[in-house]
Amino acid sequence: MIALLSRRLVGLIATLAVVSLLIFAVMDLLPGDPASIMLGTSASPETLATLRHELGLDQPLLWRYGEWLAGVFRGNLGQSYTYGVPVAGLILERLAVTLPLALMAIALSVAIAIPLGVLAAAHRGGLPDAVASVFSQIGIAVPGFWVALLLIMLFSTALGWMPAGGFPGWGVGILPAFKALVMPAIALALPQAAVLTRVTRSAVLETLHEDFTRTALAKGLSKRRVLWRHSVPNALVPVLTILGLQFTFLVAGAVLVENVFNLPGLGRLAYQALSQRDIIVMQDVVLFFAALVVVMNFIVDLSYLAIDPRLRKGV
């Protein structure tokens, strides 16, 4: 087990090192000069040169990459060109919105998809299977931002039950902040639940045809007990894989929904940094997203060992 963890950790560190280099190189290739964007077209060449020197833009690429990476290891992510504040503070501030939103969305997705997928597999060809199929097709076809607009029209404009957008902050109380995230979480969760329902149904159907399932039924166990005690636990590996991918998507890919609801999250921060050519913020936010994906994959790999003893035999 220790040898496996060591190999996975080495792979994680190597992956992050390669990803950080790619991120820095791609950001450097983006068109436009950050100094020119910050000062405007009317700035003199001397002023531009001074600002470029202050930002380190006149240094070689590898030197700037080394300085940036050293700062990341020290916890110093640099200063935002646009906001004039430390990037680490910006990310933590926006993460306080995005992380609860992602957790709410993934919890809602699991609460819908797992029971529906299991019921669809247990009643293949029946009404639950038809409901799951229709839900999956609609959920996959309809984009999250369109669901967000429908929710605003219904619950905010027509009924007045929920706020249409904005985030009051956790300092005003948990309930107002929670209410501001409910509709965005639903808009994010429904498409993810549609995908997870399909995966759960397919995984459970596959285990229902395994020898251990037929053996359990032959021993006299009820279908319900066999389903939840044997089939569902053995179907969790592909489900966990999708959940890991979905969580990283919900943290990193909620740009459209955050913009629809005017939420100050990480996705919106990345969009604003890109439009304002704030390279420091872009580099750090994209590196955070990449690190999140790598770490989540590492956690999912370890969870496989916890739920499937067969995978531990070769460790």
Image (cartoon, rainbow, N blue to C red):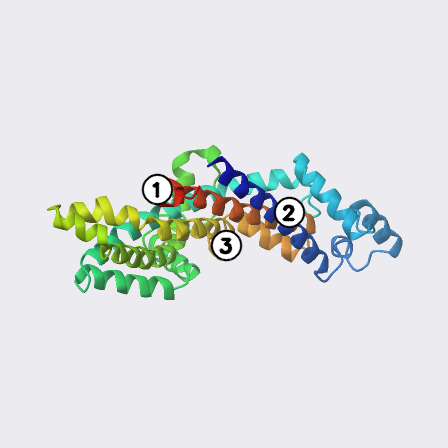
SS for dot 1: helix
**Nearest-to-viewer mark from 3 and 2:** 2
Q: Distance between the residues labelled 1 and 2?
A: 32 Å
Above or below: residue 169 compared with residue 224: above
Q: Name the residue under label 3.
A: 253
Between discs 1 and 2, the one toward the N terminus: 2
Q: Name the residue under label 2.
A: 17
Dots 1, 3 in contact, CB < 8 A: no
Residue 309: give its label: 1
**Is residue 278 in sight in this rendering?**
no
SS under mark 3:
loop
Q: In this view, does 207 lie to the left or right of 31?
A: left
Give the residue displayed 48% in from the left and 47% down from the top. 297
How packed mark 3 is, by other alpha carbons closer than 10 Å (few <14, some 14-19, many 20 or more), is some
Nearer to the camera, 181 or 305: 305
> Which residue is at 36% across, 58% downward?
195
- Inter-mark Cα distance, 1 to 3: 34 Å
CA–CA distance between discs 3 and 2? 22 Å
Q: Which residue is drawn at 71% across and 47% down?
A: 81
